[in-house]
Image (cartoon, rainbow, N blue to C red):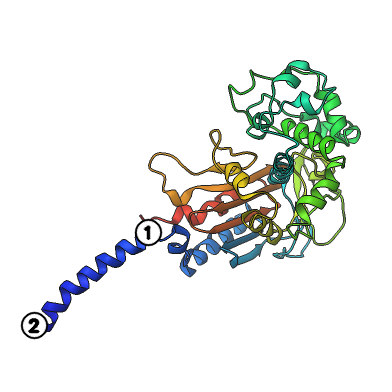
Amino acid sequence: MQCSAIVRPILRRLHLLLGGVLSLLPLPLLAAPLPDPLALAQLDGFALGLEAAGRFSGTVLVANGDAVVFEKAYGLRDENGEAPLSPGDRFNLASAGKMFTSVAVLQQIATGKLTLDTTVGQVLKAYPNRRFADTVTVKQLLTHSAGAGDIDELFGAGHAADRARLRTLADMIALHGGREPEFTPGTQQKYGNYGYVVLGRMVEVLSGEDFESYINAHVLKPAGMASTGFVECTDPADDIAAAYVDVAGKRVRNCQTLPSRGFAAGGEVGTARDLLRFVQALNAGKLLPPALFAQATTTQREFMGLGFFATGYGKDVPERDYRWGHGGNADGICSDVRHYPHTGETVIVLSNKDAPACFAVSNFLHAQWKGP
């Protein structure tokens, strides 16, 4: 009794001391054991339920730091076939591919060829609309606050002829370069695709390389992303997930409604493992200087950093929920890439089904995490 009476106060003091020390440790270190096996099993069950309901097919990858702790595929590679998807299959990335364009632009900033305040006209000297050219900046394009608008002619069953003639970024600018900004640049935020066409064309002019060649050489190859790139939508490779859409009451391949090939606003094909390599390469400073990358993944306006989603913040939102990455969706496509810097988690979900099911899967772990 006397011994325990002496020991208990010591243990209490030791507990308080350890608690104080642990509170000073970096958050990723404290969070390293998460997500735990139970949470991953619940994630698996959730994805299986969506698959059974016909709402989800695709691949799910969860990494803790550099270690993959969960990786599984669900559903069929082609809804008209019998072959199951595998974790190494390639999917259309939709707008998640905008991150590659953003990195390419930021690389021009890192080499001194651009600044965030550079205007379109300083690079694209002959840009038709002079108000757009002289006032829209690189930062506004990266954050969707330029009023650049979209390029609707690339999407939908009724635009097949337009897609056939709009094969290059220069073609797309020739089509829409004459229009005014939708609003005074910098005063609003409206997500769209055309601004990234302009950014991609600026990269071509500054680098002297076509967009695909630049991304392959300066983004994908340094990151070790051998299974990611630009392919025709109709490519028959048996590791590419096929996707479908309803047109005039019939199920048809989404190649009938989408650009035939990836471009500066997205649409490349890739694997979940390659996207993890992309996240790792960015975190390791292989693609961008660390200070510039930190700026790019800090919220600049609402949900956007500099070309990356930078969201999961605000009043009463736990710090652990802050994330950077990018999602995307189009006909028969849903993609989501999330990195949580405060916990060290990376969650990647790629699907050949329509949104929003893939977003529910990618959000599941943090939505279920009810701790303080």
- Image coords of residue 74 (percent x, y): 65, 62
Q: Is 326 placed left or right of 93 in the picture?
A: left
Left or right position of 354 against 151: left
Q: Secondary structure at mark 1?
A: helix
**Whether residue 1 can be seen here:** no
Pinpoint residue 232: horizontal percent, then vertical percent.
86, 48
Q: Is residue 158 left or right of residue 25?
A: right
Residue flagged by tag 2: what amino acid is it? Answer: Gln
- Identity of the amino acid at label 1? Leu
* Callout 2 secondary element: helix
Q: How many marks?
A: 2
Q: Considering only vertical position in the picture, is 270 above or below 128?
A: below
Q: Earlier in the sequence, mark 1 or mark 2?
A: 2
Residue at screen point 57% across, 59% down: 47
Choose between 67 and 10: the one closer to the eye: 10
In this picture, residue 149 sits left or right of residue 363: right
Location of mark 1 (residue): 24
Location of residue 107 (image quadrant): top right
- Please determine whether, in this image, residue 78 is positioned above or below residue 33: above
Q: Residues within 10 Å of mark 1 (few under 14, many from 20)?
A: few
Front position in the image: 362 or 140: 140
Q: Which mark is residue 339?
A: none
Name the residue nearer the viewer: 58 or 276: 276
Query: Which quadrant does the C terminus fall into?
Result: bottom left
Q: Classify 308 as above or below 18.
A: above
Near-viewer residue (302 or 206): 206
Q: CA distance from mark 1 to mark 2?
A: 34 Å
- Closer to the camera: disc 1 or disc 2? 1
Q: Which mark is residue 2?
A: 2
